[in-house]
Image (tube, coloured by chain):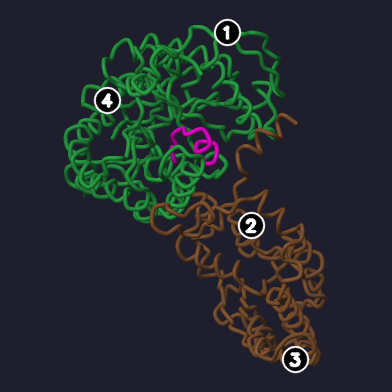
Amino acid sequence: MQFGIFSVGDVTPDPTTGRTPTEHERIKAMVAIALKAEEVGLDVFATGEHHNPPFVPSSPTTMLGYVAARTEKLVLSTSTTLITTNDPVKIAEDFAMLQHLADGRVDLMMGRGNTGPVYPWFGKDIRQGINLAVENYALLRRLWREDAVTWEGKFRTPLQGFTSTPRPLDGVPPFVWHGSIRSPEIAEQAAYYGDGFFHNNIFWPAEHTKRMVELYRSRYAHYGHGTPEQAIVGLGGQVFMRKNSQDAVREFRPYFDVAPVYGHGPSLEEFTEQTPLTVGSPEQVIEKTLAFREYAGDYQRQLFLLDHAGLPLKTVLEQLDLLGQEVVPVLRKEFAVGRPADVPEAPTHQSLLDAAPKGVTAE
Amino acid sequence: MKLVVVSAGLSVPSSTRLLADRLAAAVGRGTPVDRQVAETRVAETQVAEAQNVETQVVELRDLAVEIAHNFTNGFPGRSLAAAIDVVAGADGLIVVTPVFSASYSGLFKSFFDVLSVSDADALAGKPVLIGATGGTARHSLVLDHALRPLFAYLRAVVVPTGVYAASEDWGAEGLDGRIERAAGELAGLMTGLSMAKQAPQAPQATQAPQVKQVKQVEQVEQVAKGGLGSVGDPGDFAVVPFEERLAALRA
């Protein structure tokens, strides 16, 4: 099982000091967080993609390429890559290039994006959101798998014998996850292709997550990719930890109370009761995360959101120490207990290469 | 049959709740009125079931904070989720609001906002009796200018008679008659629609509409067999098979 972190990349004032980091500071902080993730033994770093303030990561492969050059093992991913507003040709090229530079340590998570105004900025129509996601992704798959693509669709100019360069590393396209919060259509799309399904459950009660994951698993089996238990599932989660849980609550409450996503709503206590947010000791984080398996089944990837609510970089790095030293080693051990042998690990470049038919590098 | 009362009264006791209770009691009495009509169509056992009206009351005052949180969070808290389920599962609804600023109260509207976000079809085809209370009879058109369009938008079947009670109506003649008439209309619709649901459809079973449904919308339930344990409430998700989405783009 893989453990990692994902970052939204928001520039949020620190409510305890009133100070807002600059874009430059936030971008450098995201990189520092990614490097720290490898240092403390995590497996994955994923960055969001946004094209409006107060978010900074508009160019994920640029950032991930930089992180790739300064890490050895970390898998670089996205959360999410906008399959609606990005040109699938450019996604194919950018991520194949990143694959080569990172020696295969790349996968990505597709998302539609839920910010309406972004669509026209990229010449797209939000009313076509689902259709854009469907057509663009179908084309992206062909661009990675066929050396010369002749294609015609509704949303971009036709292609005549087009070759996307560079070709994927070793002829193996990056593994794709489909990220979803509330759309059953995305679970269906992921299942159809046998891709991974990442349910970003951070703001949702367990019951909703359970139903979405069950839908994906049943449809995965329906399309003949394996048993429901063999489907590739990822989950989110967000935490704030201190050794003593009371210290965690005391320190995080002023951040929670006014944070852009949590604040001015239910109390910290109500929110932690109903969603994956855990504010407490490493033991509490372990307990809550292990419980995800009870409703999602044995799964493949757990990503934590740590740099939220305007927490300063120093605090986030301390969180990473706790996560890497005290939480993840226990989770690795405990999640392995009782895990059936036929439940696969998250696909990696090496595992996909090993599984590819010898002498055949494209479909 | 399940009758659910949604009351947006704020004070305790509240005249809004009082009107809601009077309407609910009248609906309970109203079902036997339909017995003659019903008996001509279906067996007596079903009539007996139809008269068995079970009433539940949703007090929005108790849910006010969770309703507000639903707007900031995107998901309902436990009590609100339970209330939404109760309303969505009703055979008929009585909804009563106090008048605020020439319309239903914000709390009343907010409840139906979060309900429709949670399930856009929650009220589709559902019989609804609309009621309102106010300090003066000058607001009585709130029923037809505010509540009726709201429930028309939500595709509910609004009974012809709405009941407005001003302070002065509680001691005056006429309110009882309006309550009885409205309740009779709701009871009639609930019984009729409930009978229609129960009526045997064998002759139509293999005809086009049902076949079409199976073909176009595969219920998750059908494919979830062999999944992990029990599937919570699979009927909530109806998925268009992905091939159809791809095919629609190529068309």
Q: Could you give the CA–CA distance between mark 4 and mark 2, rounded to whole angstroms?
A: 42 Å
Disc 1 to disc 3, C-alpha distance: 74 Å
- Residue depth check, mark 4 versus mark 1: number of the one nearer the observer: 1
Q: Quadrant of the N terminus of chain B?
A: bottom right
SS at mark 1 in the image: loop
Residue hosting label 1: A163
Name the foreground residue: A300 vs A98. Answer: A300
Subunit that carries the residue with mark 4: A
> Are circles 3 and 4 on residues that touch, CB within 8 Å?
no
Q: Image check: A272 left or right of B189?
A: left
The residue that label 3 is drawn on is B35
Separation (CA) of disc 2 from disc 1: 47 Å
- Label 2 sits on what residue type? Ser
Question: Is residue B203 positioned above or below B43 on the image?
Answer: above
Q: Amino acid at mark 4?
A: Ala
Viewer-nearest of labels 2 and 1? 1
The answer, for residue A239, to whether it is visible in the render is yes
